[in-house]
Image (spheres, rainbow, N blue to C red):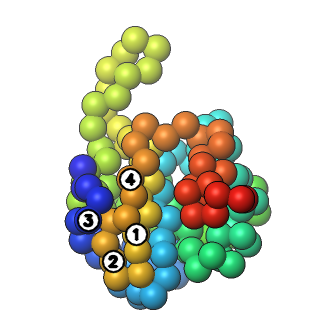
């Protein structure tokens, strides 16, 4: 996994509308890059809706929210439409970015081990450096957790 101070690997991925996003196109903005396991699942829905609800305040603080999972563009669109998400969901179906950021690994659920995307968020500064890493994210309250680190009065 990448650490604070590392250069954030650039990427080029399509969002839920087929628009291509490159990380390098967001220089001069801070980026909340969050990796999540699966569209339309309970925890991922809670996390996405919290980012949706906090997005205007995040934008006022010069942040851009980008979500990444291995789901296809079509499923991202369904997820986005159903919950009226107001930020890009990027499709990394080949897991190139997921692997570059080191967020694919062994997980445990109900006593069983399996491999999957580890819920992780990276805050990337205006120059493309990793400023903060949130590992083993709990979906509920995560957007407020981030807001608290950038604006303690939020």
Q: x, y (%) of residue 16?
A: 57, 69
Please name the residue that numbered disc 3 is placed on: 5
What secondary structure is found at the residue carrying circle 1? strand
What secondary structure is found at the residue carrying circle 2? loop
Q: Earlier in the sequence, mark 2 or mark 3?
A: 3
Residue at coordinates 49% horizontally, 82% vertically from top-left?
29
Q: x, y (%) of residue 102?
A: 25, 50
- Label drawn at residue 133: 4
Q: CB under 8 Å between callouts 4 and 2?
A: no
Q: x, y (%) of residue 132?
A: 39, 58
- Left/right placement of residue 82 relative to residue 22 reads right
What secondary structure is found at the residue carrying circle 4? strand
Q: CB under 8 Å between callouts 4 and 1?
A: no
Q: Earlier in the sequence, mark 3 or mark 1?
A: 3
| Label 3, label 1: how far apart the Cα atoms are | 9 Å
- Tell me the crowding category of disc 3: few under 14, some 14 to 19, or many 20 or more residues within 10 angstroms, Cα based: few
Q: Which one is closest to the eye, mark 3 or mark 1? A: 3
| Label 4, label 1: how far apart the Cα atoms are | 9 Å
Q: Is residue 87 visible?
A: yes
- Left/right placement of residue 107 relative to residue 15 reads left
In the orientation shown, which residue stands out farthest toward the front?
Answer: 153
- Label drawn at residue 128: 2
| Label 2, label 1: how far apart the Cα atoms are | 6 Å
- For residue 107, what is the image quadrant? top left
Please name the residue that numbered disc 1 is placed on: 124
Q: Earlier in the sequence, mark 4 or mark 1?
A: 1
């Amino acid at each position: 996994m990448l650490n604070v101070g590392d250069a954030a690997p650039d990427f080029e991925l399509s969002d839920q509308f087929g628009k291509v996003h490159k990380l390098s196109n967001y220089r001069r903005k801070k980026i909340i890059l969050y990796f999540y396991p699966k569209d339309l699942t309970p925890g991922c829905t809670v996390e996405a809706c919290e980012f949706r609800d906090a997005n205007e305040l995040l934008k006022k603080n010069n942040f851009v929210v980008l979500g990444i999972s291995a789901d296809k563009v079509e499923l991202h669109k369904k997820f986005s439409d159903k919950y009226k998400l107001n930020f890009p969901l990027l499709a990394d179906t080949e897991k190139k970015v997921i692997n570059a950021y080191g967020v694919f690994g062994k997980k445990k659920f109900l006593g069983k081990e399996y491999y999957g995307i580890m819920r992780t968020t990276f805050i990337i500064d205006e120059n493309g450096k990793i400023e903060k890493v949130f590992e083993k994210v709990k979906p509920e309250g995560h957007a407020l957790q981030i807001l608290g680190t950038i604006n303690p009065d939020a």
